[in-house]
């Protein structure tokens, strides 16, 4: 069997590890988790109303959302990891009508959107009691994923399949037969490699002579532990501004996330993030101070962005035995599992065709 190394135990790396054919490969994951975006994340799987002009990105996000039923079945995801409870979008009344028309148009190619309903102010509050009475648009196909819980679950599955985990920072070096992974304690040889370490990919590829279009961005989420035991059934809410309200089971409510370009690699929780997120959401909440008093902790991670805000993934043209993936930005929970699955198909079947999802790799990685 061939030996394959994965650097990065985030949403791409662990999905890839679980979809690789262990009859063909022995798999080793190098997972030094400091700053990992997925481990700090929780978010909304509901890409259909995005107004981003990048059609390739939208196709990837659309197909990423459509992939979730397969992912749920294949990985036996439970409700504390992923739930499809719908998405509420809060905007001005005129914009809600425009978004409803966009949703109906996109539903032709994405039936996963589900039902599209403009809710009255009273219906919005009934659907999500934390909110004030305000009109909204409800998309029934929207879901929510707890990135931290997803990784813990997939790591157990991978270990049960015989995947080996090494909790050390690794660097990469090319040799005559493939790739060397070098840590502080050991050097190991592999036939194949996949690099999915978020923004640290730039540093790794630089070690083997490549320049990469990547930058880090800090993101913070707030976690509240409340007595709302019915919260698991509540939809997520995309508030008008930089804040999403994400209710999980057993009263766990998340509010986020920040997008901090200046802080980049800094992982310290900040009072400024708390102030920004609570103030941005206050006007939409029925009893904001009651919620805010139940603040538990922060989740802090570092995302990866490219100059055009689009992800890239796949084998390097000059090195078909080496695949890379990064640049997911804030859409990683939607696109990451599908990218991991596509990379596994590449290694399992030696077939690769993703022109509909991304620009050529040369736009992001070059010698």
Image (cartoon, grey):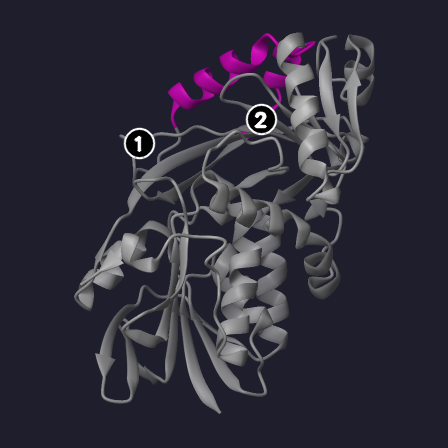
For the C terminus, the image quarter is: bottom left
Residue drawn at (40%, 21%), measured in percent from left and top?
Answer: 271
Q: Answer above or below: position of 333 versus 295.
A: below
Residue drawn at (77%, 16%), measured in percent from left and top?
Answer: 124
Q: Answer above or below: position of 138 versus 58.
A: above
Q: Which residue is mark 2?
A: 244
Q: Mark 2 or mark 1: which comes first in sequence? A: 2
**Left or right of 85 on screen, residue 95:** left
**Left or right of 119 on screen, residue 164:** left
Return the residue nearer the eye: 27 or 33. Answer: 27
Residue 290 lies within the magenta run? yes
Disc 2 packing (10 Å; few <14; some 14–19; many ≥20):
many
Q: Give the x, y percent position of residue 324.
A: 37, 63
Q: Answer above or below: position of 270 versus 334.
A: above
Q: Main secondary structure of the magenta part?
A: helix
Residue 261 is marked as 1
Residue 267 appearing in the image: no
Q: Which residues are magenta?
A: 270-296
Q: Give the x, y percent position of residue 290.
A: 66, 13
Q: Give the x, y percent position of residue 22.
A: 57, 83
SS at mark 2 in the image: strand
Q: Give the x, y percent position of residue 217.
A: 34, 37
**Left or right of 237 on screen, residue 326:** left
Return the residue nearer the eye: 298 or 86. Answer: 86
Name the image quarter holding residue 92.
Answer: top right
Residue drawn at (38%, 48%), measured in percent from left and top?
Answer: 327
Residue drawn at (59%, 19%), measured in percent from left and top?
Answer: 239
SS at mark 1 in the image: loop
């Amino acid at each position: 069997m061939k030996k394959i190394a994965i650097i990065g135990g985030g949403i791409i790396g662990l999905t890839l590890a679980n979809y690789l054919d262990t009859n063909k490969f022995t798999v080793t994951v190098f997972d030094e988790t400091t700053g990992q975006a997925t481990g700090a994340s929780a978010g909304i799987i509901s890409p259909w109303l995005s107004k981003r002009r990048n059609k390739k990105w939208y196709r990837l996000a659309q197909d990423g959302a459509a992939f979730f039923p397969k992912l749920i079945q294949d990985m036996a995801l439970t409700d504390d990891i992923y739930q499809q409870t719908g998405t509420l979008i809060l905007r001005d009344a005129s914009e809600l009508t425009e978004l409803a028309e966009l949703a109906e148009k996109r539903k032709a190619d994405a039936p996963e959107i589900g039902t599209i309903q403009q809710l009255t102010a009273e219906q919005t509050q009934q659907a999500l009691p934390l909110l004030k009475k305000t009109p909204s648009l409800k998309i029934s196909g929207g879901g929510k994923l707890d990135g931290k819980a997803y990784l813990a679950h997939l790591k157990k599955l991978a270990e049960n399949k015989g995947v080996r985990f090494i909790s050390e920072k690794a660097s990469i070096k090319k040799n005559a037969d493939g790739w060397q992974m070098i840590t502080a304690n050991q050097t190991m040889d592999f036939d194949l490699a996949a690099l999915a370490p978020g923004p640290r990919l730039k540093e790794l590829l630089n070690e083997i002579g490549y320049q990469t279009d990547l930058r880090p961005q800090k993101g913070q989420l707030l976690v509240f532990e409340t007595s709302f035991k019915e919260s698991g059934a509540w939809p997520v809410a995309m508030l008008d501004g930089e804040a999403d309200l994400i209710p999980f089971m057993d009263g766990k409510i998340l509010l986020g996330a920040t997008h901090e370009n200046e802080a980049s690699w800094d992982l310290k929780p900040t009072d400024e993030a708390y102030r920004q997120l609570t103030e941005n959401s206050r006007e939409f909440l029925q009893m904001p101070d009651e919620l805010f008093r139940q603040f538990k902790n922060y989740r802090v991670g570092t995302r990866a962005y490219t100059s055009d805000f689009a992800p890239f993934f796949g084998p390097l043209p000059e090195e078909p035995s080496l695949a890379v993936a990064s640049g997911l930005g804030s859409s990683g929970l939607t696109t990451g599992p599908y990218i991991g699955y596509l990379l596994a198909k590449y290694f399992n079947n030696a077939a690769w065709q993703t022109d509909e999802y991304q620009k050529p790799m040369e736009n992001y990685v070059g010698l």
